[in-house]
Structures are given as structure tokens and as C-alpha cells.
Image (cartoon, grey):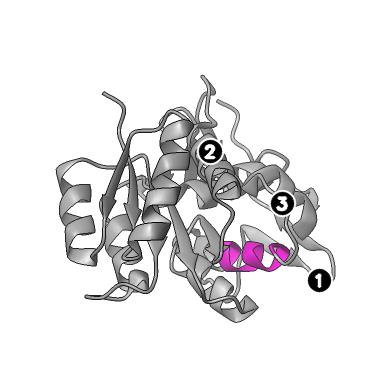
């Protein structure tokens, strides 16, 4: 049986519309209206993805997002009325894979769900990529990352972003390129989301995230990956 899409939304009308559109796109869908119920359902069966309202009655959606991310490789799409750029950036910094502002088009939301799932599954049969004498190893098939032989918890969006940069060491990617190549969508303002994901990645793979050696900033342009690919 297909793993479900979990909708966490306390507005029943909105939840019904989202559920109907996702089911119309052939997804299996489970709806809950509290953070406690969402965590319980996710622990029972890890969802394919979560559509998460931030304004929940029993707990903040931001806190729930962090708990859900600890369960496994789980894309989270935040659904909220918080529309400012800084609030969106905060959402990405907490590990969100996408951020949709209410009132949201249900058709667009279905597209966003498909996009994060595509990023999560974009692996094929590629062999692991090793850098800096095995210091960093990206396994696209298993969608895993190790650093010094230790597994690194990484979101699907962070993995795709790192894989895009690492596929061409030394090449500078603009934020706009990374939005379209790694994030899979092109909407106004989302270039800033790249910065939040890069910050998260640096905290996970750099010895000193304030003085990064692997992911370099090219000021006024974008980012490049400076690791050296190992010959396997």
C-alpha cells in the first residue's frame, strides 16, 4: 500500500479541499487536526510527505516540523498565513522543504507536493559520490550523506541542493539556477530560500560553518562547491 500524504490542518474546510485534490491526483491521504495526532500517525506509518499548517491548537507547527524531521527522510510543506519573507526564511531554516502561503491554490499545492516528492526520489542508479578522500560521501540511490563515515541527517531539499552543487565542483551557481535546478520550482522570492538551505547544509558538513571550506559564497552571484571528487 502506498504511504500516505499527511495533512495537518485544523480548518476542516481547507483540509477537505486539499484532501480532495490530492486524492484526485491518486495520493492516499490522512488528515489530522492537532500536532499530537500528527506525530502519532507519523510514528505509526512514515508519510510520503506532510502538508503542515503552522497555526495548530495544541502546539506550534514549527516545533512539530522539527519533530517530524527526526523520524526520517520526510518532506514537509508548510501551509500558513504567515506571508512575510522573513517568516518564509525561518520556515526553511527549520527544515521545511517548501512553504505555501494561505489562501493557497489547491492545484498549486498538489504541484508542490509532487515537486518535493520528485526531489526526494531523484536518484536513479547513480553510484555514491566521494569527496576529499572520503570525507564526504553522497549516495543518490539511498539518498544518504556521510561525513567522516558518520551519517548526516539531511532533508530531501538539502540533499538535492548539495548534489547539484557537488555535481560540478568549482562551478558557480546563481541562486536563480539553484532554485530551478535543485528546488524544482520558480516563484518570486524563493531565491532567498536557497540561503536558508545553504546555512543548514554548512552547519551539517562544515568543520566551521562560519568559515566554510566546502560550500563557498561567490558574493553578488551565488555559491560553489569546492570539494575535490575522489576517483573511485
Q: Secondary structure at mark 3?
A: helix
What are the residue bounds of the magenta stretch? 190-198
Q: Position of residue 63 (x, y in %)?
A: 31, 72
> Which numbered disc flags the more N-terminal residue, 2 or 3?
2
Q: Position of residue 127 (x, y in %)?
A: 51, 24
Q: Secondary structure at mark 2?
A: helix
> Which numbered disc flags the more N-terminal residue, 1 or 2?
2
- Which residue occupies the foreground of this view, 135 or 152? 152
What residue does disc 2 label?
A: 114
- The mark lying in front, picked from 1 and 2, is 2
Residue that appears at 34% across and 33% down: 28
Taking 123 as reference, is 226 above or below it? below
Q: Can residue 211 be spotted in the picture?
A: yes
**Residue 219, disc:** 1
Q: Position of residue 178 (x, y in %)?
A: 71, 51
**Residue 178, disc:** 3
Taking 151 as reference, is 194 above or below it? below
Judge the density around disc 2: few (<14), some (14-19), many (≥20) Cα neighbours within 10 Å.
some
**Residue 64, disc:** none
Mark 2 vs mark 3, CA separation in Å: 18 Å
Q: Is residue 191 magenta?
A: yes
In which quadrant of the rendered image does the C terminus lie?
Answer: top right
> Which numbered disc flags the more N-terminal residue, 3 or 1?
3
Amino acid at each position: 500500500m502506498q504511504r500516505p500524504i499527511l495533512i495537518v490542518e485544523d480548518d476542516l474546510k481547507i483540509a477537505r479541499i486539499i484532501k480532495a485534490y490530492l486524492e484526485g491526483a491518486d495520493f492516499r491521504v490522512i488528515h489530522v487536526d492537532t500536532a499530537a495526532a500528527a506525530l502519532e500517525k507519523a510514528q505509526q506509518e512514515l508519510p510520503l510527505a506532510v502538508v503542515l499548517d503552522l497555526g495548530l491548537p495544541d502546539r506550534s507547527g514549527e516545533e512539530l516540523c522539527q519533530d517530524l524531521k527526526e523520524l526520517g527522510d520526510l518532506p514537509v510543506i508548510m501551509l500558513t498565513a504567515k506571508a512575510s519573507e522573513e517568516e518564509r526564511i525561518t520556515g526553511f531554516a527549520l527544515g521545511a522543504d517548501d512553504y505555501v502561503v494561505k489562501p493557497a491554490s489547491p492545484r498549486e499545492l498538489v504541484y508542490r507536493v509532487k515537486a518535493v516528492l520528485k526531489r526526494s526520489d531523484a536518484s536513479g542508479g547513480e553510484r555514491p559520490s566521494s569527496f576529499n578522500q572520503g570525507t564526504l560521501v553522497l549516495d543518490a540511490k539511498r539518498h544518504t550523506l556521510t561525513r567522516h563515515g558518520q551519517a548526516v541527517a539531511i532533508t530531501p531539499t538539502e540533499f538535492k541542493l548539495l548534489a547539484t552543487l557537488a555535481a560540478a565542483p568549482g562551478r558557480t551557481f546563481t541562486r536563480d539556477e539553484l532554485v530551478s535546478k535543485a528546488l524544482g520550482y520558480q516563484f518570486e522570492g524563493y531565491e532567498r530560500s536557497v540561503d536558508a538551505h545553504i546555512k543548514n547544509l554548512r552547519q551539517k558538513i562544515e568543520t566551521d560553518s562560519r568559515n566554510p571550506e566546502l560550500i563557498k559564497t561567490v558574493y553578488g552571484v551565488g555559491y560553489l562547491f569546492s570539494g575535490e571528487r575522489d576517483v573511485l
